[in-house]
Amino acid sequence: MKSNARKSGAAPAGRRNREAEILQAALAIFAEKGYAAASIQDVADAVGVLKGSVYHYIDSKEDLLFQIFENAHGDAELMMRELEALDVDPVERLRAYLERGVANTLQNLELQSLYFRDWRYLTGERRAKLVERRRQYDRYLRDLIAAAYKFKGLQGTVNQRFVSSFVIGGTNWVADWYRPDGKDSPAEVAKSYAQLALAAVLGVAEPAAAARPR
């Protein structure tokens, strides 16, 4: 997004609402058509404004894609802070991370589809920042797995980079087959996937313990 609004402090409510409207429209259009095939004109038409008006809020189409992902990263960081505040052991914290991650994927199918399909269209500093974000999440998951191993007294025999990649790939794949109008609820799928991931990583399939805020 353009930086001049940030320099002058918080943007007026009307501007924030229009920015949010533009981002939501772009997310839906990019997810449906693919980033490469979509245009700023498509976004303007969806919002009901002239194409030139959209550029009051963005610098480019790539800027739109990047800001959509930035908002998603902010939500992910909030989730991680909430996980750290849970009064649970390392295994339950890992379970909570997996369960919440899958639930978030199922509740934001358009975003997840766009993220894993089209993130490579970002270039320069935007791409570098997103790549670093992805590395941070991978390191965070590896730390959760290592803490769970230690808590259970287990000795890992597989490179933890492979383990985290296996878990990320397996849990993210759910977005490819899940249908919101199906019989399986997001909560049920998330709980089952977290259980499966724990069994694969730790060799255990224990029932979830109650989590309490600190």
Image: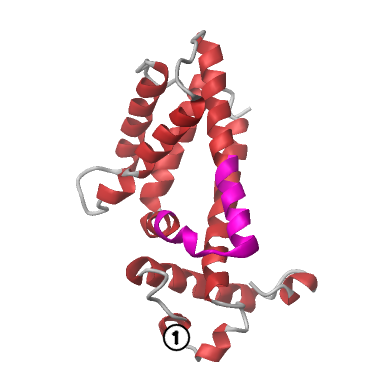
Q: Nearer the viewer, residue 64 or 205?
A: 64
Q: Nearer the viewer, residue 172 or 185?
A: 172
Quarter holding the C terminus is top right
Residue 26's quadrant in the figure?
bottom left
Q: Is residue 195 visible?
A: yes
Residue 71's quadrant in the figure?
bottom right
> Which scheme is used to colour this image of the protein?
secondary structure
Residue 112, given in percent of the width and then of the height, sits at: 41, 54
Q: Is the magenta region chiefly helix, strand or loop?
A: helix
Quarter holding the N terminus is bottom right
Query: Is residue 160 positioned above or below 50 on the image?
Result: above
Q: Residue at x 43, y 61 (%)?
A: 118
Residue extent of the magenta highlight: 116-136
* 157 in the magenta segment: no
Query: Is residue 42 positioned above or below 148 on the image?
Result: below
Query: Is residue 154 positioned above or below 56 on the image?
Result: above
**Residue 112 placement, left or right of 84:** left
**Residue 91 placement, left or right of 32:** right
Q: Nearer the viewer, residue 138 or 193?
A: 138
Q: Residue at x 65, y 61 (%)?
A: 125
Residue 209, given in percent of the width and then of the height, sits at: 45, 20
Q: Residue at x 38, y 60 (%)?
A: 110
Residue, disc 1: 41
Q: Tag 1: residue type?
A: Gln
Q: Which residue in the rendered view is the most extreme toward the top? A: 153
Residue 131, given in percent of the width and then of the height, sits at: 57, 51
Query: Is residue 39 positioned above or below 163 on the image?
Result: below
Q: Residue at x 30, y 36 (%)?
A: 188
**Residue 154 placement, left or right of 15:** left
Q: Is residue 212 visible?
A: no
* 132 in the magenta segment: yes
Q: Secondary structure at mark 1?
A: helix
